[in-house]
Amino acid sequence: MLPRAVLFDCDGVIVDSERPMIELLAHDLAGFGHPVGADRVLQMNLGGAVPQFVPRMREMGIDVPEDWVEDFYARLYGILEIETPLVEGIVPVLDAVQSAGLKMAIGSNGRHEKMEITLGQHPAIQDRFRGLIFSGQALGKMKPEPDLYLHMAEALEVRPGDCVVVEDSPTGARAAAAAGMRCFGYAGHAGAETLAAEGAVIFTEMAALPGLLGL
């Protein structure tokens, strides 16, 4: 059945911004005396926001400085400002969704400031979603809670069951399931198995998504 709206995650689905954050987290963990490879950090925090990682750091025995989150974001924004490319193949996907007359929105656990930096490098993409870019941190409810996706559906005036979600993380796929929405899982950074375990329909090339959506 053709959906009425497609709700896109941002990092790793629209813009290729996931890896810089993970590498910076790995760098900081090593600085705190806990060297963990970037791939392991990716498994620990893919789809999560930086504040959500603080409890895990404390579980590791790290005395996290009070200003660490803000300092981390400042350094991350400096990296992302240099260049944040689009995810390969996403533009034809957006073209197909718009041509079919479906509504679209972007929802991320990340801050609005971060999305302004990453999406702002691609004005044509940002303009497509003007007023329809939502932050779980700003909402006060982050994935895997369903609130962000439910809020997006309400903003688009579409029933949750008529929305589909495009995600790249188990955290986001879990949020979609909790919201009662079908989820298509882009197995770029996360393994297909972890996404499938959360009920997502797996795809590995953006070119396959329009067909999966029924367009």
Image (cartoon, grey):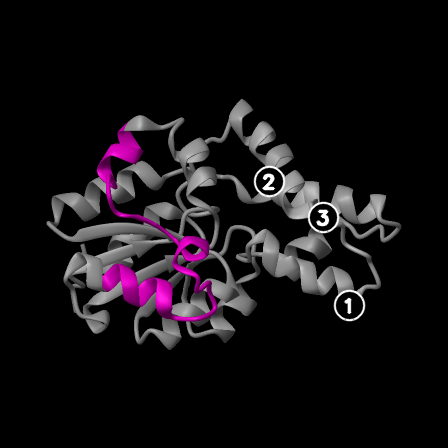
| SS assignment at label 1 | helix
Q: CA distance from mark 3 to mark 1?
A: 18 Å
In the image, what residue type sits under mark 2?
Answer: Tyr
Residue at 36 percent of width and 28 percent of height: 122
Numbered badge on residue 73: 2
The relative height of residue 120 versus residue 10 in the rendered view (above or below) is above
Which is nearer the N-term, disc 2 or disc 3?
3
Range of the magenta residues?
124-153
Please state which of the two labelled residues, at mark 2 or mark 3, is closer to the viewer: 2
Alpha carbon distance from label 2 to label 3 = 18 Å
- Judge whether 177 appears above or below 31 on screen: below
Residue 90 lies in what quarter of the image?
Answer: top left
Closer-to-camera residue (186/104): 104
Residue at the spot of label 1: 59
Quadrant of the image for the N terminus? bottom left
Of labels 3 and 1, earlier in sequence is 3
Label 2, residues with CA under 10 Å away: few <14, some 14-19, many ≥20: some
The x and y percentages for residue 150 are 29, 67
Q: Which mark is residue 38?
A: 3
Residue 163 placed where, x, y %? 23, 65
Callout 3, which amino acid?
Ala
